[in-house]
Image (cartoon, rainbow, N blue to C red):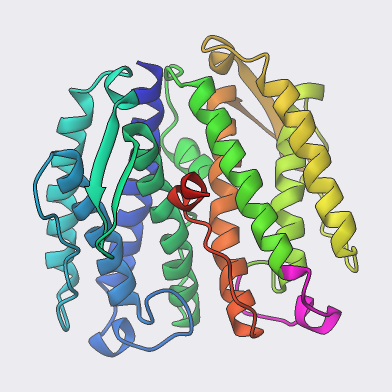
Amino acid sequence: MSRIGTLMELFLHNDCTRNKLLDLASGLSDAQLDQSFEIGLGTLRRTLHHLWAAERIWLDRWLGRPNAKLAEPQPRQPVAELRRQFDETAAERNEWLSARTDEALERPLTYTNTRGQTLTFRLADTLTHVCNHGMHHRAQAINMLRQLGVRPPRADYIFMKIEQPSPAPHALSPAMIREYFEYGEWASGRVLEAMSALNDAQLDRTFEMGLGTLRRTMLHVHDAEQWWLGNWTRGPERAFPKLGDGVALPEIRRRFESTAAERRAFMSTLSVDGLKNTVKVQPMPGMFRTYFVGETLLQSCTHGTHHRAQALNMLRRVGAKPPEIDYIARLRT
């Protein structure tokens, strides 16, 4: 049941982080919830609603309900009502997922999307898509909170494990994690390809999100991947590296490709039991933490999704057309 266990962990992170956002949103005025931003669905309220509506329509598809529709946002919908919808959907989803088997996740799911297209994907892939979609849009909501003067929550998967440590390792799926990394490699490649059409002024234009610029944000995505890889393969790395400035885009792309190749070699040796081993890391000088290997792999996968969401918005703001990088978009290529 390692695929089920992996999805349960991803959905747990999904729910915990979403609840933190709702806690903060509940203290905001209607004017703040509906303030316009050049990101996400345009407002915090609409972005939060979209997170729920996407979960709801996909759950209806998994349950085999005909004519599943994407719920339209309600003007000034109270955060408390939105929380109730999230809680009900999550409870129904968890009950359904806990009754599935890994074998059941391999079955095809055929559905009609919001554009009227009939599509078929493996059930497991649609579940991963929903988890990944939530991370993408939560990154946008977090930026909106920051611009509203609200200190956003720590949203990384690994922070959930610090706050709610697991007494024993979960049964996670090496194959599913490898698939997630393959998606991340594809998505980062598409972002870097879009960036290749930009000049240095656009790559280094400053924004109040991510690591401040497109170049630095994608460099951070790579550096995090390389840092975790070093911890898995060489033991405790030095504290997380400081960003360098002025790294040329071809060099950033080369680093991504080199790290991906090394990570694929490492992942090819991992078993379910290997994910239950521990790894000691040093995120800051003199600060050491120990995690289960599987937890840190999920952190590395999901971290990239968060920051690529920021990179897409930066691309849009400099006048470039951002690529479609939904998890399910890769399956259609």
Q: Is residue 119 left or right of residue 163?
A: left
The image quadrant of residue 306 is bottom right
Q: Is residue 141 left or right of residue 50?
A: right
Residue 245 location, x and y as percent?
A: 88, 67
- SS majority, magenta: loop
Q: Is residue 307 above or below residue 259?
A: below
* 205 part of magenta stretch: yes
Q: Which stretch did the figure color magenta?
A: 195-209
Q: Is residue 191 above or below residue 199?
A: above
* Image point (83%, 80%), residue name: 199
* Image point (57%, 43%), residue name: 183
Q: Quadrant of the N terminus?
A: top left
* Image point (70%, 31%), residue name: 281
Residue 39: in sight, yes or no?
yes
* Image point (36%, 88%), residue name: 35
**As rendered, which of 102 and 42 lies closer to the eye?**
102
Residue 274 location, x and y as percent?
A: 59, 12
Total label count?
0
The image quadrant of residue 236 is top right
Outermost residue, left side: 66
Residue 238 location, x and y as percent?
A: 83, 38
* 259 part of magenta stretch: no
Q: Is residue 151 left or right of residue 238?
A: left
Residue 110 location, x and y as percent?
A: 25, 41
Residue 217: in sight, yes or no?
no
Q: Is residue 95 above or below residue 152?
A: above
